[in-house]
Amino acid sequence: MDTGSTAWMLASTALVCLMVPGLALFYGGMVAAKSVLNMIMMTFGAVALVGCIWVVYGYSASFGDSIGGAGILGDVSEYFGLGGVMKDDPKAVIPLSVFVAFQALFAALTAALICGAISDRIKFGAWMAFTGIWVTLVYLPVAHWVFAFDGKNVTGGWIVNKLGAIDFAGGTAVHINSGAAALAVILVLGKRIGWGKEGAQERPHNLPLVMLGAGLLWFGWFGFNGGSALTSSNAASVVVLNTFTATCSAMLGWLLVEKLRDGHPTSLGAASGAIAGLVAITPSCGAVSPVGALVLGAVGGGVCALAVGLKYKFGYDDSLDVVGIHLVGGLTGTLLVGVLATSDAPNGVDGLLYGGGLSLLGKQAVGAFAVLAYSFAVTWLIAKALDKTMGLRVHPEAEREGVDVHLHAESAYDLTHTPAPAPEPAAAG
């Protein structure tokens, strides 16, 4: 047992856990004041539900021996209820239990990302039902495809083993997956009341909250990407460096697009650009050089800044730009591995610019679009079934007045101030 690597994985798990409030604040600040608690509740609710599913059968379905050796789904019975993970394996580099906890947060955050696309208009109960079904039918198989490596007497997923595509920390399983799912749910759920009409769009109610959330996500992402090395090593160090580098250039890339397009850079753009860079570098952080990370981040930030405007062109109401940032950013980072990868990086594979030819780019494209197609199709069916049975959408009155009060009987801010009683005059003499 490597105590240094174990310590790094425990710290990385804690860092990724900090991304939960980071995401809640990032999303919460971007919605109207009347919806901020609902957004935070959807984030935390998804994490709580997925954490329970992960213990019962989620980990086993993702990382158990592939059923029939097809690389599609892990054996649900192998680790059912996480039996056996507490045993000390003297041959292991890190305890299995810390890996289970680390990956549980990946599953939980992937599901939580989707809620940013559907703010202000979905029932909380419907959201929780959707989350449980979606994780079971979509995330768990995709995580097996991408994250489950072949081992001794163990068959893993088809994308990472048979196809040989590179996805260091979840560009496909996390970001393309959640972005495609978000688009499918949006199309079933429909637009917010008044969306697209001039003056009717709700503005972010607290931009400092958005910036704070982005900062917490950036901090936690060092554990998200760096912890995916699974050891305290040079590979983890290179990944952390690339993660920081790409985020910086992506923020500048987004702000440059804003300046040229709109005439001014914004704090919302800076926060969004940082997240776009983090998304883009996630699959590629172990495959590119620091200069490659700079290029990849700048491209990812600029492309995502342009992509968020597609919702107005095509008429889908992506409330907080989950499609524009996570789907497009995940695709950008995944595909650019095939161009910018260098064998000097931890993954040890050359892309097109380093003499590797088109082979790796082709593998990256197959993996990316396979996840996109599967996630979109199955998510649409899940959302459609729930809409026909329990109904997804809140009543129009709740949408107009605010889902915080109607769904949770709470308000984020007490805006009524009762003045303190005036002091009694002092007695004469």
Image: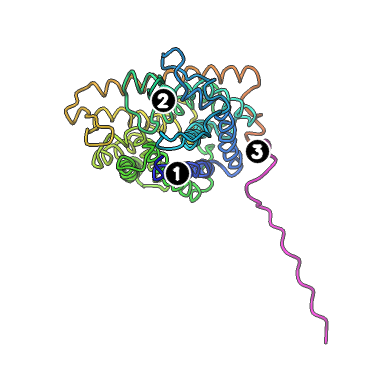
Residue 307 place in picture, x, y as percent: 38, 32
Inter-mark Cα distance, 1 to 3: 30 Å
Q: Which mark is residue 148?
A: 2
Residue at which label 1 appears: 217
Q: Is residue 406 magenta?
A: yes
Query: Which residue type carries mark 2?
Result: Ala
* Mark found first going from the N terminus, 1 or 2: 2
For residue 125, above or below residue 404? above
Name which residue lies at 51% across and 24% down.
Answer: 60
Residue at which label 3 appears: 401
Q: Is residue 118 magenta?
A: no
Residue 278 place in picture, x, y as percent: 38, 39
Query: Which residue type carries mark 3?
Result: Glu
Question: As drawn, which residue projects farthest toward the front?
Answer: 90
Front-lying residue, 328 or 415:
328
**Magenta-colored span:** 402-429
Q: Callout 2: 10 Å neighbours few (<14), some, many (20+)?
A: many
